[in-house]
Amino acid sequence: MAAIHPSILSADFVNLQAELDRIANADAVHVDVMDNHFVPNLTLGLPVVQRIQQVSPVPLDVHLMIEDVDRWAPEYAKTGAASVTFHVEASRAPILLARELRACGARAGMALRPATAVEPYLDLLAELDLLLVMTVEPGFGGQGFLDVLLPKIRRARAAIDGSGAAVALQVDGGVSESTIVRAAEAGATVFVAGSAVYNTPDPEAAIDRLRQLTDL
Ligand code: DX5
Ligand code: ZN
């Protein structure tokens, strides 16, 4: 069953509560946390995520694009977020971190930058609830979907199916009505979409259209 997670990176940051209410039919809201070190952009941090958690009509899917993530990710899990995703490139101890996130009550997600291969991490699948294959270089919304990542999505899908672990396969970056079918055919099941949802007059209708397109 496909899930659509709009990213508030493309929302109006001065009106977050209203912007959350505009996506009430989403499966979760994707919250991009950037520290201007792991990626060359700065968004929001823990106090803002705590408030989003209090007012959001849908569960939170927190995507941490930050350094020192072993220290900070558990704090995001303690906000009550449904899932917290860290970048494996930023973690010193990803297995321990995934276990800590679960112990804090969140689903544990691990993200891979476009040039990070999935193969070295396949033994970690049992520790994870979500694997995020980035389909743009993280840092900014509105970039084009990198088709060169489709084989990696397919390999991740095959590995997840072969492992028997219940791991959701998420794609993030450039997901739109013209790219989501390719990602779904490759095996993704959770779709983050920022500009394709928020840069439209009716975000709820955009979510419905994206969801229908994944019904292969
Ligand atoms: C990029 C972020 C994405 C971004 C996606 O680093 O992780 O979540 O918001 O935006 P779109 O869907 O516009 O590519
Ligand atoms: Zn993201």
Image (spheres, helix red, strand yellow):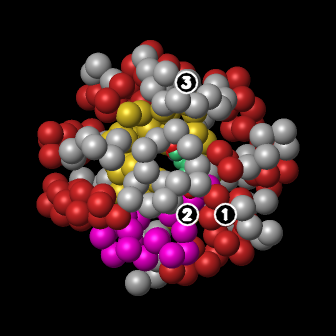
- The foreground one among 195 and 205 is 195
Instruction: Give the answer, above or below, for where 97 lies relative to 144.
Output: above
Snapshot quadrant of residue 92? top left
Which three-letter amino acid code belongs to the residue tagged 1?
Answer: Val
Does the residue at mark 1 contact the one at mark 3 (Cβ under 8 Å)? no
Determine if residue 112 is in view.
yes
Label 1, secondary structure: give it: helix
What range is drawn magenta here? 175-194
Does the residue at mark 1 contact the one at mark 2 (Cβ under 8 Å)? yes
The residue singled out by tag 3 in the image is 36
- Image mark for residue 170: none
> Marks 1 and 2: which is nearer the front?
1
Which three-letter amino acid code belongs to the residue tagged 3?
Answer: Asn
Residue 23: percent from the left, percent from the top?
A: 72, 60
Q: Please identify the quadrant where the N terminus is shown.
A: bottom left
Residue lying at 41% horizontally and 33% vertically, measured from the top left: 86
CA–CA distance between discs 3 and 2? 27 Å
User: Residue reaching furthest bottom?
Assistant: 216
Q: Is the residue at mark 1 in contact range of ligand 1, meaning its CB lies under 8 Å from it?
A: yes
Q: Residues within 10 Å of mark 3 (few under 14, many from 20)?
A: some
- Image mark for residue 4: 2
> Marks 3 and 2: which is nearer the front?
3
The residue singled out by tag 1 in the image is 197
